[in-house]
Image (tube, rainbow, N blue to C red):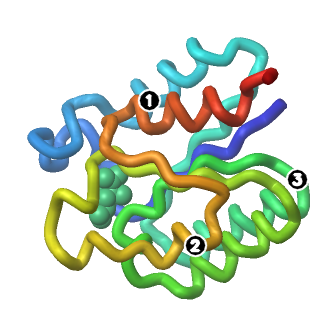
Amino acid sequence: LRILVLNGPNLGRLGSREPDVYGNQDLNALRALLEADAPGVTIDLRQTDSEPELMSWLFEAVDTSTPVILNPAAFTHYSYALRDAAAMVTKAEIPLIEVHISNPHAREEFRHTSVISAVASGVIAGFGFDSYRLALAQLTRQN
Ligand code: DQA
């Protein structure tokens, strides 16, 4: 089993970006945590600041039937293009779990809206990197 763990804009700066909100671990640490949780699962973790590149990875998920853990970052709040690409994944009955490190509902008003959530299989937010680990647990559970 392979799982795409896709991260949107500014998440490449994790570790130094707003550590009070996002912690001080970077994406390599996240990859190591996920790999330790799910031996035998290929964790294909990627990050981009580019909306079209992130969309192309969702097309790839559709074409290869690969489950997705998606942190859309700021695109969460306004990208209808990313939403439509995410909808292609779940319409193909491939799971796509939206995750957030912080709890956007406890933050600024503009973060209270997600244009992605309605087309995601589910949403996990507010648990730091554990949000991704919970999503991985859901995608790999046997019962
Ligand atoms: C985020 C929350 C978003 O509001 C923000 O734009 C991010 C990260 C999170 O993981 O908490 O970049 O998706």
Residue assigned mark 2: 118
Residue at image coords 59%, 44%:
5
Looking at numbered disc 3 in the image, what kind of residue is underneath it? Ser
Residue assigned mark 1: 30
Q: Are marks 2 and 3 in contact (CB under 8 Å)?
A: no
Q: SS at mark 2?
A: helix
**Dot 1 crowding, Cα within 10 Å, few <14, some 14–19, many 20+:** some
Residue 82 x %, y % = 58, 77
| Closer to us: 110 or 5 | 110
Q: Is mark 3 within 8 Å of ligand 1?
A: no
Residue assigned mark 3: 65
Q: SS at mark 3?
A: loop
Q: Which dot marks residue 68? A: none
| Closer to us: 1 or 125 | 125
Quarter of the image with the N terminus in it: top right
Quarter of the image with the C terminus in it: top right
| Closer to us: 136 or 14 | 136
Residue 12 x %, y % = 37, 50
Residue at image coords 18%, 48%:
17
Query: Closer to the camera: disc 2 or disc 3?
Result: 2
Looking at numbered disc 1 in the image, what kind of residue is underneath it? Leu
Judged from the image, the quadrant occupied by ligand 1 is: bottom left
Residue 54 x %, y % = 59, 67
Q: Is residue 36 above or below residue 24?
A: above
| Horizontal side, residue 17 vs residue 126: left or right | left
Looking at numbered disc 2 in the image, what kind of residue is underneath it? Ala
Residue at image coords 35%, 76%:
113
Query: Mark 2 or mark 3: which comes first in sequence?
Result: 3
